[in-house]
Image: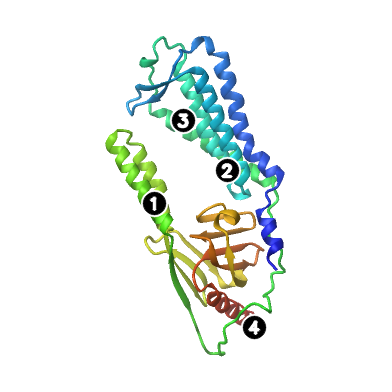
Amino acid sequence: MTTAPLSAALRAPARLRALAALPFLLAVAVYLPLLAVWSDRLPDPLATHFSTGGQADGYTGRTAFALAGTALLLALGAGWAAFVHRNALWGAWLTAGLLGTLLCLVVGDNLDATDPARVVSPLSRLAVAAGAGAVLALAGHALSRLVPEERPDGSGRPDPDAPRLDLGAGEVAGWSRATASAPLTALGLLLLAAGAVAALLGPWPLLPLGVLIGLPGLALARVRVNVDRHGLTVRSTLTPRPRVHLPLADITGAESRDVAALREFGGWGYRVRAGRSGVILRSGEALVVRRGNGREFAVTVPDARTAAALLNTLVERRGRL
């Protein structure tokens, strides 16, 4: 019964893939001509790595820099095109804007330099790249409207064959279960530690980067899933946020189903795909909830069948009120 919705969710339209690859191709189309036009005004090698004070401390030949920058842009473009979904198209444009701007700024910093060791690149260049990335992210978000949203098939009515709990008219019930992801915990701690070590060794901007990436990973590494008369709630056990709540009025049914984290959701953590979203901590048993707008929400948790049966009972009871 789930084959058709699953295949639809995994199928990204060609237009979406093209829009995801487009900003990376545009970045290459600016980056390479810039190197070619200014080739006689650039030193060889180029200053391509800078200390926190902006002084050059690493160098790369012009040809190698052109090839490496192009390969990185194309590889990232191919990756985004392969795994993109409609609601994350802005991320592809943000990535291309950040990287493409940084590469072009490095070329500009080297312009007319007679000695690459004396090239300076102020830290403010990162703000310029972030600004360009933000502008392109807005463009990508706007372009996502050109791609129709795919939704799983469904009538919006409760499935009469879905599992239910036998509750009396006056009985109330709730279900709660905590679940954790060892890989996400390890990754979050590793990123925090790497940022701290990097900061001690010199490149301090890596510390906030490690915190920005590591803390959300830790927050999602252990969650508690609650089902009661208010609906479904998934919250971190470590921090007040993130928290996902689906009110009972927004739920049309639920089931227990095995999910493949990488194949169906593209990874672990809070995931958004075409027609579905979820808190995915591993592959395997998951509570899958159908919403009134046709989308699905999944959370990987043990004993998902009991949670689904209770939700179906509560949804059916609410429909009789």
Regarding mark 3 in the picture, which secondary structure is present there? helix
Depth check, front residue: 250 or 155: 155
- Judge whether 166 appears above or below 258 on screen: below
Regarding mark 4 in the picture, which secondary structure is present there? loop
Q: Which residue is mark 3?
A: 128
- Distance, label 2 to label 1, CA atoms, is 24 Å
Q: Which residue is mark 2?
A: 90
- Residue drawn at (60%, 77%) of the image: 312
- Badge 2 amino acid: Trp
Q: Which residue is mark 1?
A: 188
Q: Of label 4 and label 2, which has the lower sequence position?
A: 2
Of the numbered discs in the image, which one, if any, rests on residue 316? Answer: none
Neighbourhood count class around disc 2 (C-alpha, 10 Å): few under 14, some 14–19, many 20 upward: many
- Residue drawn at (62%, 31%) of the image: 25
Q: Is residue 132 visible?
A: no
- Distance, label 1 to label 4, CA atoms, is 46 Å
Q: Of label 2 and label 3, which has the lower sequence position?
A: 2
Q: Find residue 63 and report its horizontal and vertical position in percent.
A: 52, 18
- Badge 1 amino acid: Gly
